Image (spheres, rainbow, N blue to C red):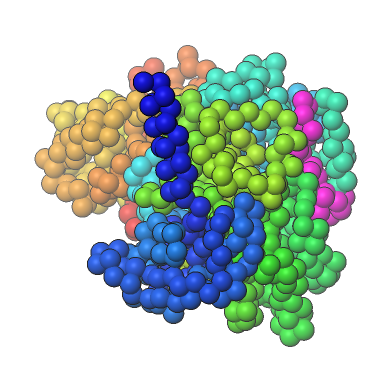
Amino acid sequence: MHKQSYLFFIFFLLLNTAFAQDSWIRINQLGYKPNGIKVAVWCTKSEKLNNKKWQLIDDQSGKAVYSATTGKSSGTYGPFSETVRLNFSSFIKPGKYYLKAGKAKSPVFEIGEDVYKGSADFCLRYMRQQRSKYNPTIKDSCHTSDGYTLYGPMPDSSFINVAGGWHDATDYLQYVTTSANATYQMLAAYRDFPGVFNDGYAANGLEGANKIPDILDEARWGLDWLLKMHPKDDWMFNQVGDDRDHVGFRLPQNERLYGRGYERPVYFVSGEPQIRGKYMNTTKGTSSTAGKFSSAFSLGAEIYARQDASFASLLSQKAITAFAYGLKKPGYTQTASVKAPYIYGEENWMDDMELAGAMLQGNSKLNYAFELAQKEPVTQWFIDDTAAHYQWYPFINAGHYELSKKMSGKEKQALINFYKQGIQIIWKRAEQNAFYRGVPFIWCSNNFTAAFAIQCYWYRQMSGDDTYAALEQGNFDWLFGCNPWGTSMVYGLPSRGDTPVDPHASLLKIGKYPTDGGLVDGPVKGSIFNNLIGITLYDTDEYAEFQSDLAVYHDDAGDFSTNEPTMDGTATLIYLLAAKEAEGSKKKVSTKPVNAKPPVVANAFTYDHGAVIKGDSTQKKIALVFTGDEFADGGFYIADVLKQENVSASFFLTGNFYRNPAFKNMIRTLKSNGNYLGPHSDKHLLYCDWTKRDSLLVTQEIFANDLGQNYKAMSSFGIKPTDAYYFMPPYEWYNDSIAVWTNHFGSQLINFTTGTLSNADYTTPEMKNYRSSDTIFQSILRYEQTHVSGLNGFILLLHIGTDSKRTDKMYYRLPELISYLKRKKYALVTIEGLLNL
């Protein structure tokens, strides 16, 4: 009996060995565009691939639609004895197909114009998941107490509010180095390919359209954090947290790792080496970080000039101060660590300042930028074929691309040639193998690959030369399965394909949240993997037969060197995917010189959390706005003053107010006098927590029902929803979700303009925040007299009534206020007259 079992086992083993797969066809699992380059790689461990027939098969009919014979084999590569390229670019018919060659058969893939559609937006899922302060994936706040300062001109451990931005990867550290680059990449993607991006999420990252493309919501999240990290002209910070964060998988809420409660350290850009443990970095200056700040701010200003003029103006000013900070001490800034030697050890800065100079408005620094371009024509990793961790960063010098748009003649051609020089270096290595792989297998190799593909793309757009188009496509294909392991390097993309399922990601490992859209680090040399500290594979290696000394990749949560998604790499990929989606359509990138004049402002309003809080600051208009719920003691007096002064105001009243029998005559008077009457919620609900603004206290259903009842109460006065488009939230307190829900309801959320104390006219003497009417009145005058734009575009909030405990009624100062505003030539208009959306 035992002998029979043994013989059966031997027979089964021999049978299995005889039929074991030893040839594979690697393809881009996303697919190929009909008129694009279409190449797969046939790789084997046993067959001879010279002059072998291969076929393209229609998946539905099973019939061959294209066939060819291989040329000369490209020889060995990694684990394979032979490899060869299968080029079917001439086949353009859309459909679903697979390739067959010898004993190998590829996965099914698609040829079609829309094969890349939505892929860039899909990767934004990972960016949203990386958010700090409020994280829409876990639907909770985190790291809201950041942080305490180190190395700055202020006393060490001073508190500074820098909550926001993105966690860098699976750890929760935050770096300007990567965040500013990610912000620039996403802004550039929107600028160059605006038609690619859709709107499915609110500014806070939760589901719900807000009339803003999601790519801009994400870039704005980055810009807002960068502004916090450069709060003053002579203050600039480089990172939040350090490697004391590296304590294993966990969710980001309620972390206490640094001995100061929930606070984390915030490192100042001092331009000098910094040390917290036994490891000191080699920082030489301020330029690399400051340059990245400046270019992100400049591009943000360019884009937001058409949407938010005041925000664009702030970004323009910050771009200038950041650039000046970069000139303070020319040199690079590295990150700081405490426990381990792994840092972002950047050692170049001229590329950052070149880009910053190219992006500044007015073209005042173009000559300086071109000088730097000549000094660093090719990023050093191209030449060295290796690099320490983030030694030469960003991995692509976008300065050449941006500067070339503003140059002409020899200078422009020189910049184009700089890109070509780098591409030729990579091509000399890539042409030796079937995968066209010339990018080194070092940490974050996928980030390098995406960046290099973009450089090839930019070169092609700038020069019109498509010599390296196949090299560009080969690097793109590599990221989605045309690689030795046959796997996409992006979690969940494509949904039907072989993609990472077990990345080194806390939110997936602990919280079971999928890391959709995250680009993992990618393969590294076997020698690099074997010498890293702290790596332990948790599971059997499903790609064991494809590992080699050349490169290893593990779809294993224990491998932080090859399988950890990163925020900045994903942002770079978003640009590349947008370019690929737009290619062939009429959405190509413009390489024309940028007009130095400010663009025409189509909407110069100021927004906060999705609500309009200020009109056009270039127009001398102001809207007086009154809110009311339970009190109306000033109603008739206010109505009389407005009528006597021949001006109209806006009144936002709750359903409680509209239904109160005692207020009906007053409401009719206000309406007949030509004032604007709008909603203020039905029951004066508090929508979100006072201290955790992103934590909602109502559901969308409760919100919609309540606002609907408010409009119903208004209908008894002949006020239709179309007559009351603008909605002032109760307590003037809301968040992005409320703004989105308001839009879904068909209304526009507004709020008062900050800067004066007018909204404090409800306070009573026993309150800590009590303000007298004179104090309030003087705050209005002071603001008008000390700001360049005065009260232009202001939504000035007052109350129609207050508690009887307040005897010093601000509405009695209304004649004096209106008289002052008229003398200053302001037009007093309703909210409709101010915004007219």
Along the horizontal axis of the image, is 403 left or right of 803? right
Residue 643, how many percent across, how many down?
30, 48
Q: Residue at x 51, y 52 (%)?
A: 22
- The quarter holding residue 377 reads bottom right
Residue 365, how many percent across, how many down?
77, 67
Res. 701 in view = yes
Q: Nearer the viewer, residue 683 or 13?
A: 13
Q: Is residue 327 magenta?
A: yes
Q: Quadrant of the C terminus?
A: bottom left
Residue 347, how many percent across, how many down?
82, 50
Q: Nearer the viewer, residue 642 or 187?
A: 187
Please, which residue is most extreme toward the bottom here?
409
Asked if 75 appears above or below 755 in the picture, the reply is below
Q: Nearer the viewer, residue 700 or 103?
A: 103
Along the horizontal axis of the image, is 785 left or right of 337? left
Asked if 67 appears above or below 150 in the picture, the reply is below
- The quarter holding residue 334 reads top right
Please, which residue is most extreme toward the top here?
766
- The quarter holding residue 376 reads bottom right
Residue 498, how many percent across, how many down?
44, 48
What is the chief secondary structure element of the magenta stretch? Answer: loop
Q: Residue at x 48, y 76 (%)?
A: 69
Along the horizontal axis of the image, is 713 left or right of 193? left
Res. 295 in view = no
Q: Which residues are magenta?
A: 326-349
Q: Quadrant of the N terminus?
A: top left
Q: Nearer the viewer, residue 361 or 541?
A: 541
